[in-house]
Image (cartoon, grey):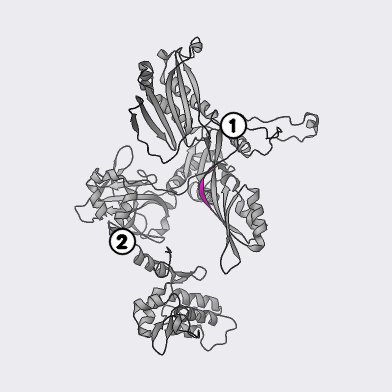
């Protein structure tokens, strides 16, 4: 069954250019009395092969329209009146009813004579259509009739907002029932902070209210229980410690306008001012400390495109830092970080989002000239096979790190005891990676060492996962098993460290190093981010479209043609690293006939060894994509790159000097 269908009522017919829209239900109410039939029957008949028989005054099907003389109800009742209006606006229209006459027959009273008598009939037509079939009314009506109210929706929402363990908290029932009585605990979830222009606040800004230039930050959220009132004491939860606040500003957010109110009952959306110092992006507000925490916002994509930003004038650095803080608060998705090199890096979802963030930073938040680096793309590192590496501890012990691929989604407990092998494993997770510290009951000294330095081993594991050995990108999808073994007899003569004089810093360092060595022995691979590109094009532009996709290492998934048109829809996977400038190049090569929409899809492992230099025939490999990407990242990070400085010694004098 189709998700969207006219029968369900979740489809509206609209003109984006004209700014009008309608639903068949609107016309069913209008024509039910005229045609002398029930509104329910007419609503069903306004879509599909249904016809109105004037003699019998009944709605009939195809069988009673053998000659095809009757028009479908959808055409007769809906499209014909719209077509009449558009025909009357035509420059060469010769009918007897002009636009003012048709507007009068529709009983439209909110249009001025000046609009109807415009010399440009197009302007008069749009005024009539927007007054007769307003876009906002059609959408709002569909939302009101189809979406469940807050009380009905809460049983479905609460599964995604709260964890099952929260059912034991008393406030849980208030949230589930969406209570708004005076004895109910007031609970509000702020989903994001919105930078609102001061001009949008009706009545002006209150005295003492914090502002940032010509804008003000307002927390946008929903009341899930109780009633929020001005002056009420509430707690901001989710930080290290609850913060007590008093609600001073409440707003009803309607479109671009912000209307001050005194109270907001449960189930409603609202804006709360004065949260600048206590809420960064999202938070839970409650009148009681005994309240479950709402989950953080979930996004389908991740921040995979980065740029480094710096002011053109060094004296503007404080303004840039303030602008970055404001941007980080205003955009729930953006990420701001400071690299080891001191660069301030801005991360966004894609090229368009990044461009928007840079413009906001330059024009709204920092308001200083800034320089932006070339886009930096995130990668990950993984392995294709199991491997291990050893590190000598003292004269008698070896710390072994074994790595293997970790299947995300398999059920693992934090502490798992295996009775058969007399081995106890403690597992710690870092993103999609897992750490397994194995203890062997036959070696008391080894268990003592692992117990004493378990936290140091865990920190070393986290450091190794944050920076892999290929190009200091995060490790993904690996399982590390750390165990302490007896050193072979022939190695007993050499000492790296005395295990009795170990400190936590040394353990962290050699745990990180031994994991990185184990990864290098496990056939490492680069993992790159992929977009799903949905391209709309014509048959004439297919060659140019495929040429652009071929140059950017794309994988074509499917190609289909839209029925009844000459429009082709192409689905392809496009590497994020090769996506910059894709839309512009596509438009240029196809003369604007192709357009693309890019959405983050998944992470893909490059099936090429980045360290492979020779091909199957023994000659030097010149098209190793993984190596090119690895060198690009290593150069950007200032790491060592294995490249030839002198390519052809005899011709070196003829090469141009590149500075």
Q: Is 252 rendered above or below residue 336? A: below
- Determine whether the residue tagged by mark 2 lies in a helix, strand or loop: loop
Query: Residue 376: where, in percent of width, then height?
Result: 56, 41
Disc 2 to disc 1, C-alpha distance: 56 Å
Q: Can residue 221 be found in the magenta stretch?
A: no
Give the magenta range: 598-613
Q: Nearer the viewer, residue 151 or 2?
A: 2
- The quadrant in which residue 621 appears is top right
Task: Please state if 117 lies on the left or on the right of 242 as rendered.
Answer: right
Image point 39% across, 25% down: which residue?
Answer: 438
Q: Is 175 rendered above or below residue 640? A: below
Q: Which residue is mark 1?
A: 638
Q: Disc 2 or 1, which lies upstream in sequence? A: 2
Q: Nearer the viewer, residue 207 or 171?
A: 171
Q: Residues within 10 Å of mark 1 (few under 14, many from 20)?
A: few
Q: Which mark is residue 149?
A: 2
- Determine whether the residue tagged by mark 1 lies in a helix, strand or loop: loop
Image point 58% across, 49% down: which residue?
Answer: 574
Q: Which quadrant does the N terminus fall into? A: bottom left
Task: Please state if 101 lies on the left or on the right of 448 as rendered.
Answer: right
């Amino acid at each position: 069954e189709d998700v969207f269908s006219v029968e369900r009522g979740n489809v509206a017919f609209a003109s984006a250019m004209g700014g009008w829209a309608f639903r068949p239900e609107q016309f069913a109410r209008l024509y039910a009395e005229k045609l002398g039939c029930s509104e329910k029957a007419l609503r069903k008949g306004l879509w599909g092969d249904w016809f109105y028989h004037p003699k019998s005054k009944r709605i009939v099907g195809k069988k009673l329209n053998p000659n095809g003389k009757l028009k479908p109800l959808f055409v007769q009742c809906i499209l014909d009146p719209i077509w009449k209006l558009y025909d009357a606006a035509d420059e060469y229209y010769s009918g007897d009813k002009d636009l003012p006459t048709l507007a009068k027959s529709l009983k439209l009273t909110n249009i001025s004579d000046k609009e109807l008598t415009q010399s440009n009939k197009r302007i008069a037509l749009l005024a009539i259509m927007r007054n007769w079939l307003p876009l906002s009314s059609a959408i709002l009506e569909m939302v009101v009739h189809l979406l469940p109210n807050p009380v009905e929706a809460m049983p479905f929402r609460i599964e995604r907002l709260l964890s099952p363990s929260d059912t034991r908290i008393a406030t849980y029932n208030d949230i589930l029932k969406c209570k708004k009585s005076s004895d109910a605990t007031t609970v509000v979830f702020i989903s994001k902070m919105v930078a609102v222009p001061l001009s949008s606040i009706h009545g002006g800004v209150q005295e003492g209210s914090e502002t940032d230039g010509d804008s003000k930050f307002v927390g946008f959220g929903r009341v899930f229980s109780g009633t929020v009132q001005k002056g009420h004491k509430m707690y901001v939860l989710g930080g290290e410690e609850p913060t007590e606040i008093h609600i001073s500003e409440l707003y009803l957010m309607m479109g671009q306008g912000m209307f001050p109110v005194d109270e907001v009952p449960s189930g409603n959306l609202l804006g709360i001012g004065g949260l600048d110092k206590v809420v960064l992006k999202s938070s839970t507000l409650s009148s009681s400390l005994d309240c479950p925490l709402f989950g953080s916002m979930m996004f389908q994509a991740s921040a995979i495109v980065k740029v480094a930003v710096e002011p053109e004038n060094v004296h503007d650095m404080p303004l840039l830092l303030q602008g970055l803080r404001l941007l980080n608060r205003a955009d729930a998705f953006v990420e701001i970080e400071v690299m080891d090199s001191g660069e301030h890096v801005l991360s966004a979802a894609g090229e368009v989002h990044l461009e928007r963030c840079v413009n906001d930073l330059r024009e709204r938040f920092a308001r200083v000239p800034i320089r932006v680096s070339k886009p930096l793309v995130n990668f990950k590192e993984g392995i294709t096979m199991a491997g291990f590496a050893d590190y000598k501890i003292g004269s008698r012990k070896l710390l072994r790190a074994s790595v293997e691929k970790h299947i995300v989604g398999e059920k693992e407990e934090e502490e798992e005891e295996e009775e058969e092998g007399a081995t106890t494993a403690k597992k710690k997770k870092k993103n999609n990676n897992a750490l397994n510290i194995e203890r062997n009951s036959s070696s008391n000294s080894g268990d003592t060492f692992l117990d004493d330095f378990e936290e140091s081993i865990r920190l070393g594991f986290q450091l190794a996962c944050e920076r892999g050995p290929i190009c200091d990108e995060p490790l993904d999808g690996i399982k590390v098993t750390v165990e302490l073994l007896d050193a072979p007899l022939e190695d007993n003569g050499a000492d790296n460290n005395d295990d009795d004089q170990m400190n936590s810093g040394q353990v962290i360092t050699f745990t990180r190093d031994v994991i990185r060595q184990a990864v290098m022995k496990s056939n490492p691979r680069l993992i790159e981010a992929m977009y799903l590109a949905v391209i709309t094009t014509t048959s004439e532009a297919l060659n140019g479209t495929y040429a652009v996709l071929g140059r950017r290492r794309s994988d074509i998934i499917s190609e289909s043609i839209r029925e009844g048109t000459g429009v082709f829809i192409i689905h392809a996977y496009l590497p994020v690293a090769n996506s910059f400038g894709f839309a512009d190049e596509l438009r240029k090569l196809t003369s604007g006939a192709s357009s693309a929409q890019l959405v983050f899809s998944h992470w893909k492992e490059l099936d090429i060894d980045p360290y492979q230099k020779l091909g199957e025939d023994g000659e030097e490999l010149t098209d190793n994509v993984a190596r090119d990407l690895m060198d690009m990242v290593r150069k950007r990070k200032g790491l060592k790159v294995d490249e030839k400085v002198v390519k052809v010694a005899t011709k070196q004098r003829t090469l141009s000097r590149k500075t």
